[in-house]
Amino acid sequence: MGHVKNKNASKPWRRPRWVMIYKDPTGKLVEERGASTKAASERLLEMRERDVANGCWSPLRAATGAGGNPTFREYEERHNARRIEQGKALAVDGTEHGLMVNHVVPRIGARRMDSIERADIVRVVAELMADNVLAPHTILNIYGLLRVLFSWAVVKDAVTPVNPCTLKQSMGELPQLRDKDPRWRVTAKYSTQELVALLSDPRIPPDRHIVYALEFLGALRTGETSGRRWLDWDEMEEPLEKLHIVTQYDDEETKTRRPRAMPVHPVLSTMLREFRDYWWPILYGRRPTPQDFIVPVRGRGKPRAEAPRPCRDKHTMYIQLQRDLQSLGLRSRRQHDLRRTLISMARGARANKDALKACTHGSKGDVIDDYTTWAWADLCDAISCVKFDLPPHTPALRLASVDVVTSRQRGSRGGESRTRYADVASGARPPEAPLTTSLSNWNDYTFSATPTGIEPVLPT
């Protein structure tokens, strides 16, 4: 007798993901992705068990519902479920499925997999190029997803005899990798004043100060920022501390699949230390452990001291950046532009190009790189030449007095309850955050801007 199971039962902050577990005709357990609700998944499980009993079950029936060769739409859904099961970051957050559903499925979604030929893929790419809506980089990403999908269809599932994705850039079948707007790239950077605002302005919460500091001074990609844990920070290295970059998001492989070590800029070191010692316990309700993410999701509701916080997803991080830029009165830019700004500043300061590349991108993987081990001091020189500092009396270096508003006392009745924490003397180290029972109710509070700051404080 089969059963339905929620794969995300241990992760209550995520949406339920139902799977059906039953035995195939050979007695082997099969785990198949269910529907969006438990009731619908149970009905689908009954259909699968009837198919097994009647001898008409096949491995592809989960995709087609009626056996035989699946359509592209049906196979793409099955393939996407498999990619999610493998933990592929762009599949988990819905990026891959969104690209397929929005741009490929409307064109060839109803076609059977074994009927799709090379000419059909050429037509799909040509239409995407003619629409002039997507950037060439995005079109190449879609084509790459198609090539991987059909590779699985040929080798693993045998639903089509050949892979039709054999297009060539030299024949004009694929776009050249270039910017959609040639004038955009020169503007894809931040000025020093804008960086100071992002890393210290009191209108931005302290956890996002650290996010932007890691992306700028640490030159980390979005997934690498999300996936950094406190154990990755080596404070004993000299002349600069070391940040190990081995994974991204929740212990997934990095983009280049090659680990690297990044020297920690002195300003980033100061911000990390004060965030760990003061703000992390306040925001998350307990002291951080080495296994905790540096900037995990804050979430809503009462934090559980024993519960690990999940890493942030790239869509939420992008939305938060856009809102922060808007609140600061700055024009919209990408998170990746912070990383690009650090590299530009280092190159402008005459940093060694090869050493800088080893810090921000890691080794290329060729023979020379495999035989090269950089001296740590040389890598530190490439980063320490970046002259950047935060002005005194900013939230990263000095805590401002703030107001705290309890969400339970807001609303139509009015009467907001406010409490105040004394200013910390200029230049003094922030006081230790007392781990009292009031921390368990920390998420009952919201930020309230004042002339001197927005950061929250413990209620009295």
Image (spheres, grey):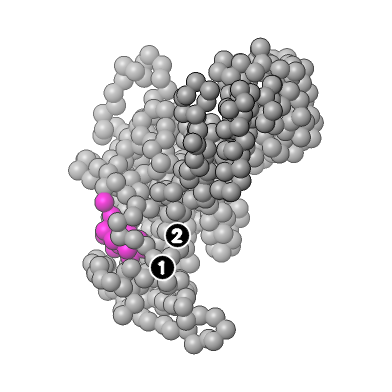
What is the x, y in percent for residue 208?
Answer: 44, 57
- The disc label shown at residue 443, or none: 1
Q: Circle 2 is placed at which residue position? A: 299
Q: Nearer the viewer, residue 5 or 391?
A: 5
Relative to 172, does residue 241 appear above or below in the rendering? Answer: below
- Mark seen at residue 401: none
In this image, 57 relative to 234: left or right?
right
Residue drawn where x is 76% and y is 29% of the image: 110
Tell me which amino acid carries mark 1. Answer: Asn
Badge 1 crowding class, 10 Å Cα cut-off, few under 14, some 14 to 19, many 20 or more, is some
Q: Closest to the observer: 33 or 251?
A: 33
Q: Callout 2, which amino acid?
A: Gly
The answer to the question of whether label 2 and label 1 lie on touching residues, with beta carbons closer than 8 A, is: yes
Q: Residue furthest left?
A: 236
SS label for mark 2:
loop
Magenta-span inclusion, residue 281: yes
Extent of the magenta region: 274-289
Q: Is residue 412 visible?
A: yes
Give SS at disc 1. helix
Decide whether the magenta segment is chiefly helix, strand or loop. Answer: helix
> Residue 114 in the image: x percent, y percent?
71, 17
Quadrant of the image occupied by residue 98: top right
Q: Is residue 307 above or below residue 246?
A: below
Residue 141, visible in the rendered structure: no
The residue that appears at 45% across and 71% down in the rendered structure is: 446
Q: Determine which quarter of the picture holds residue 163.
A: top right
Q: 120 and 207: which one is in front?
A: 120
Number of marks in the rendered image: 2
Q: Is residue 153 left or right of residue 351?
A: right
Q: Position of residue 327 (x, y in %)?
A: 56, 64
Task: From the top left corner, tell me how far across and down residue 200 is, in percent.
Answer: 42, 61
